[in-house]
Amino acid sequence: MFRVRNSCSYYVKLDMSILIICCWTLIPNIGAYAIDERSFQYLNSISSEDWKRDLDFGIESVNRQKRLEGTLVKSGVIVEKGGISHTHLLDALPNEEAKMDNDVASKLLAASLYIFNSKCLPHGINGKDCETFLSNKSLPKGSELLQKCLRIIEKRRNGHNTFRRLLDRHYQDGIYQMLPLVSPLMVSKSLHNLSMKKNLEDKQRNLAVIQWTQFVEHDLSKPVVTTMRDGSHIECCDNNSFELVPRYRHPFCAPLIIRNDESQYAKVNCFNYVRSAVAVSTKCTFGAVEQLNQATSLLDLSQLYGFTDEAQKRMRTWTNGQIKFAAKISNIYNDELAVVPGDWSNYCAFKNPSMQTSQCFMAGDSRVNNSPLTISIYTLFMRNHNQIAQKLTNKYPLWQDEDIFKTAKAINIQIYRNIVFDEWLPTVLGEDVAVKMKEFSFSKESVDLDRISNEFGIAAMRFYMSMMPNFLQNFTEVKRVEYTTSGSLPQENGVIRNENLVSFLNQTYKPDLEYTPEQIDTILESILNQHAMKLDTIYEDSLIWNNFGVNRPTHGDLLAYDIQRGRDHGLRGYIDYLKLSVGQNIGSWKDLESFIEIDDVNVLKATYSNVENIDLLVGGMAEKKSLGAAVGPTFKYILAEQFSKIYQRQNHALDPILTDSVQFKKANAVELLCANSKLNNVPRNIFRLPSDKNPMLPCNEHVKLLRP
Amino acid sequence: MFALKSVVSTRFMSLGALVILNLCVRVSFGHTIPSNAIQKRLYEAVGPETCQIYCHGPLLHTVQMAQLYQDSKTFVDMKLKNRPEKTMEEFNAFMLKYNDTPTEAEIRDFVDTHFEERGKEFETWVPNDWKENPEFLNAINDPDLKQWGSDLNGIWKELGRKMIEDVHKNPEYYSIIPVDNPVIVPGGRFIEFYYWDSYWIIRGLLYSEMYDTARGMIENFLSIVQRFGYIPNGGRVYYSGRSQPPFLTAMVKAYVDFKKDYSFALEALDTLEHEFEYWMNNHTVQAKGYDVAIYTDASTGPRPESYREDIKTSEDFRTDEDKEQIYTELKAGAESGMDFSSRWFVDENGTNDGGLKNLKTRSIVPVDLNALLYMNAKIIAEFHDKAGNTAKSAEYEAKAARILEAIQAVHWNEEAGVWLDYDMINQKPRNYFVPTNLSPLYTGAFNKSDSERISASVLKYIDDLKLDSYPGGVPNTLAHTGEQWDFPNVWPPMQYILIRGLENLGTPEAKKLSERWGHRWVKSNFEAYKQTQTMFEKYDALRFGGHGGGGEYDVQKGFGWSNGVIIEFLTKYGGDLSLSNSAVSTVSKNTVFSLTVALLISVFGTMLGRSLW
């Protein structure tokens, strides 16, 4: 089936499951997987002129797509501003560098697919053998593509690497073609049927878990969509969210489609999905390319500062080491994020083009405007940077902007990293795993060390979507009194008080709250006091779309979208990863019952024809949760594997010359929150609802460290 | 611009002529039609009546513009519950009631109460001449390919359609054109017979020894020519006004070649002549001083089966006259069989850029149509010769010679080294690849004594365009427009014409290439079948075993002509073709030893290389 390339493994007993963390070292593919000898002979007998010609031919054929793209742009088949596709696009918006990387890699992909189709398949050589051979076959010397590829690898930016894989890719052709599985929209639809009989709330965790998970995800993982050669954004559905006429379908389209009923009038509903951009991997050979990760693979707040040097330049004020902000009152801890100057369509998805709002915010990552949760946490770290910079300016009046900026950034990152490892991770993985995870060491030269795994970025780290509520409730002190006197929370009365509620759906890339300092404080209060939804396969209504029919959908389906992305990236089925994490083979639906509640198993059974086809995201979310952790064993494995790599790499990466950083080592989440807002109290563990065990701490005792 | 010999004049024809010629199209056959060729039939007068529902008019417009169905063709294939005139009366009342602006739901309700679901005109029919083990299977050595051949033979049973008795009794309730004999249809959305598709279907049936079914289909076409004067695009009244590439004569020829019995040909001869004259009289124009044939159309309005799509295409044209022009170009494109393709685009600069708006089908002299008419004239001459009609035979030889002369003068392009379509607007050849550029090789429309020179020239053309490099067959054009008769789609009839054409050319090099393409086509189709258990209407040049896409509708499965071509090629190549020895077939045995050494060195080399990374 698949091959686990671990040469040395650490077995650590962790509550229910065994967490195996492997050393990912370079083992030649050809050694681990022997390709059929006759196939090898044939492929090896191809002359070097042939390889060169094949490369050129593959590139030529992909260049022909330009004509189609011209027609699409001329016919208006591109992403419409303010539409559903635009909202999804902003979650996966490529920057210029990503487009350039993708351009080279897509040519390499086209050439490899051409060789697969013209040399391998006709000679009975399967996709895996072919890919194995190709991935060891260097690009022809002197070819333009080789030069471009080498240039990319040599000057590899911190971001824009590829995603790596825990397990081999899973495609129909072994290289790139997606498998024809049950429609993700159908999966989403049938999973939602479970919501009737379930307890939906997480009794302990608050929205900060979601907020921080999303923020860390933004830092580490950003798969982006393929664009047309002229930068236009590909649209795969018509403007009524029905299937597009075949003549307008771009080759990189993989839309989410579902036939809404069986009647003769049945129409095919459609949500845009464009295949992820790709990048050249670690070497310049033929073979399958890997999906591009535009984010940097370190916990370095690149989502705030920018993934590239260019992006970072745009974020700076160039005086006193500050990053851009919008000042409302004199105190830095009341500053707001700077707004996007000019065209906001790369940051926000307002419907009305004239709505040149003052509230489309700017950061290193366009995903800042995803929701009030993201806006508020980006704001916190922006304020924190500027407060530290101010502190440094006061302390070292002779320092230049550059020194202050660098130092403030390093300190800001250190505080952030501490909170991630010491506070957030224990909440997600459980205390024990979070501690043990730091103890592993990896061989330093491993190429995998500086890449994020597909399984992490595309599936496991997306678990928080299931915990998202529909609304953000108002928990300011005044409102809390109201709830206490009326004896219950507003929606438990069956009365929804609109003035207290913010719909996440309405705010997705359309921030239209007044983001005053008070508003940010209100949002932070809500985040700390509102319970998260349970991590399960049930998403709240506003995140999915099950209302298919002749009506035009008002929003997309995030669950279906994520499932499709998992397939686009060639993730294997859930049970393969379950085996990787707990070491148990799943041969039947019955076997699953030790890991997934029987009700859920039954729904999965009704949805997927075969137990092997369960998508990683769905299976991972359906799992019974490990004791003390938010997630089950499979996601725990995937998350721990990734964070242990990051931990080790960043421990080395830490700059020892920063003497100032020492004093900030003890800064925790409470300090961060208190110092960068006007909150009065914050719970000791910011990721859990306030309770007797998790008392509120007064903020005035926790502001000194970070404020100037 | 250019003169159509009689299509133009048809607009001024008398009502009397319409009644004689029936159908809703105004087509004239002029004085050249032998009077004995038209035998009137009972149901002939129904055309105009059903046409008010299915071909044009407010009902068609209202329903099709409401976009009730994923595929516009669905509606025009539905059976009426009442007579057409009653339906129209009720439709007028309906429009009055809703003030001419009914909602989608109201229109849907009207359709529900006045129409039955599509496909009501057929009953299941298993061809009674179907054979479990036709002889051609014995010619196939490879067991997998043999099984596949057997599967394909079995698919004929699924594609058989017989019209129910009611269609003959009450034809005005249906859009289907009634025919006496059951047919094999292409499949998918194409649930009725199609003209040129049927040529490859009939060839396949002949290899499957289903002679009665094949003959029945040919007799249907002969009767349609007798009734209507020509064969419409497909077996529906809404296809009237446009035909498809004329393959009827070749169908008869195929049948008599298989049966080695010319009597059928002699019976059909009048009708074949009639069809030939229809093309020569209604489709010819002057180019470079020669009479040449073009694809065109003789109806008005958008294509009924793609009504909304055509209205949309015409949106950019302001006047009704301009809209009518683009509708005609669209329908002429349908007549060519290549609907649609950059082959028919002429933009302001005289290139093939642009889109459907730039369709100028009628202004392009197509190589294939003229080459086909040459072949038809030759076959008719041959049949007359067999019948002992020396004078008639000589007459058709002369016609053929004139067409050949025109092909040489208008299409052959010394510079390109191949035949090219001719652009009458810009008075210049169109140097864009289409497989039909090689169609004279298939129809024999070239000077046999010149074979060596033509072969060298054509093979160079193929080499320059790297046409031999595509794993999934030769693409229809090299322009990736999104249209279905463009890159990277590959079409079975075109592969057939290329492969048979190169074989016909006769030089060893051409024959070698023909065989290579033939083998590749069989293997690539088999790969697709192996993966999906499906035969597709079109394939993908870039993917070995990949199916096509683009155009107006999703890729169809079935599929008549694909099956026909493969059955013939399996018969032809089945003795040599094998799937298992592919990998070594290109490596000679002498090199095995050195390769093994190379293998070992490379494995170690690669491992060493990798560990150094």
Image (tube, coloured by chain):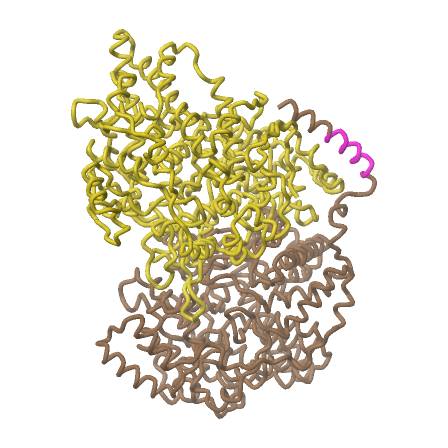
Chain colours: A yellow, B brown
Q: Residue furthest top?
A: A398
Residue nearest the viewer, comparing B415 with A633: A633
In the rendered structure, the answer to whether residue B202 lies left or right of residue A323 reads right
| Residue B109 position (above or below residue A643) | below
Report if residue B542 is visible in the image. Answer: no
In the rendered structure, the answer to whether residue A123 lies left or right of residue A575 reads right
Q: Residue at x 67, y 50 (%)?
A: A122
Q: Residue furthest bottom?
A: B42
In the rendered structure, the answer to whether residue B200 lies left or right of residue A377 reads right
Residue A33 in percent (x, y) is at 69, 37
Residue A325 in percent (x, y) is at 24, 26
Say which quarter of the image contains residue A475: top left
Q: Residue furthest front?
A: A692
Classify the position of the C terminus of chain A by image quarter: top left
Q: Residue at x 24, y 11 (%)?
A: A394
| Residue A97 position (above or below residue B323) | above
Classify the position of the N terminus of chain A by image quarter: top right
Residue A120 in percent (x, y) is at 66, 45
Residue A36 in percent (x, y) is at 73, 41
Of helix, strand and loop, which mostly describes the magenta segment? helix
Magenta region: B591-603
| Residue B384 position (above or below residue B138) | below
Report if residue A160 is visible in the image. Answer: yes
In the rendered structure, the answer to whether residue A356 lies left or right of residue A264 reads left
Magenta span contains residue A684? no
Say which quarter of the image contains residue A383: top left
